Image: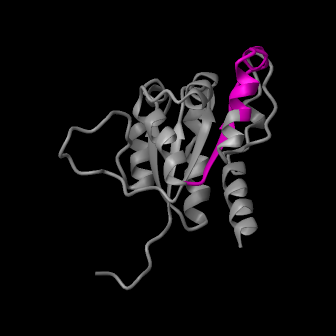
Amino acid sequence: MSDQPRKPFLYVVVCAAGIAGEVGKLITAAREEGWEVGVVASPQGLRFIDAPAIEALTGHPIRSAWRSPGDPRPLPPPDAIAVAPATFNTINKWAAGTADTLALGILCEAYGLGVPTVVLPCVNAAMAAHPAYRPSLDRLRAMGVLIGGRAPAPEGGGAEAFRWEEALELLSARDAGAR
C-alpha cells in the first residue's frame, strides 16, 4: 500500500467535434495541476482522437463502450468530469436524460452521484440557434453543471477560440467557492 495520497481523478468526456484531436492539451494541463485523467469518448468522438497517443498520455484505456457484467472497471470513479468538446447532440441528449452511450450514461449518473461536472460546448452558431439548445444548457445549469463561456462559432471556424484550460478554471472556481 502506498503512503502517498491518491490523486483526484478527472474523467474527460470527448465528443465528435473537429477540435477533439487537441484534447491532449486539456489532459496535459490537468496532469500538471495534479489530476489523474481518464478519457471517455462518445462512439463517434473516438474517431476524432489519436487513441494510442491519449492512452499513452493518461496511462489508462479510453472508454467508449459498456463493459460486460463482471468485467473489472478500467477507471476509478471520477472526482470530477469535464466534457470537452461537447457537441449539440451530447448536450441535448444529456439534458433530456438520454443514456444511450457510455459517455451519456456516465454524465446522467454523475448528477445523482454529485460528481462536479463542467462542459465546454463546441457548437456552431446555426446549431446553437435551434430552439432545443438554450433550454438544454439551462437544464444542465439547474443540475449544477458549470458551462464554459465560449460563444458559438461561425460555420466552419472558431477552433482557435476553444480554451481547453477553461474546464480546469471552472473546477477550481467551484472548489474555491465551496470552501
Pinpoint residue 49: horizontal percent, then vertical percent.
48, 33
Q: Relative to 91, is 72 above or below?
A: below
Which sits in the foreground, 76 or 58? 76
Looking at the figure, which quarter contains the C terminus?
A: bottom right
Q: Which residue sits at x=71%, y=32%?
A: 137
Q: Is residue 111 visible?
A: yes
Q: Is residue 79 left or right of residue 32?
A: left
Q: Is residue 90 left or right of residue 169?
A: left
Region rendered in magenta: 115-138
Which sits in the foreground, 126 or 110? 110
Pinpoint residue 174: horizontal percent, then vertical percent.
71, 60
Q: How is the image coloured?
A: one colour
Q: Which residue sits at x=68%, y=34%?
A: 139
Quadrant of the image occupied by residue 93:
top right
Q: Relative to 139, is 11 above or below?
A: below
Looking at the figure, which quarter contains the N terminus?
A: bottom left
Asked if residue 119 is among those painted magenta in the image, a careful observer would answer yes
Pinpoint residue 135: horizontal percent, then vertical percent.
73, 26
Q: Residue furthest bottom?
A: 3
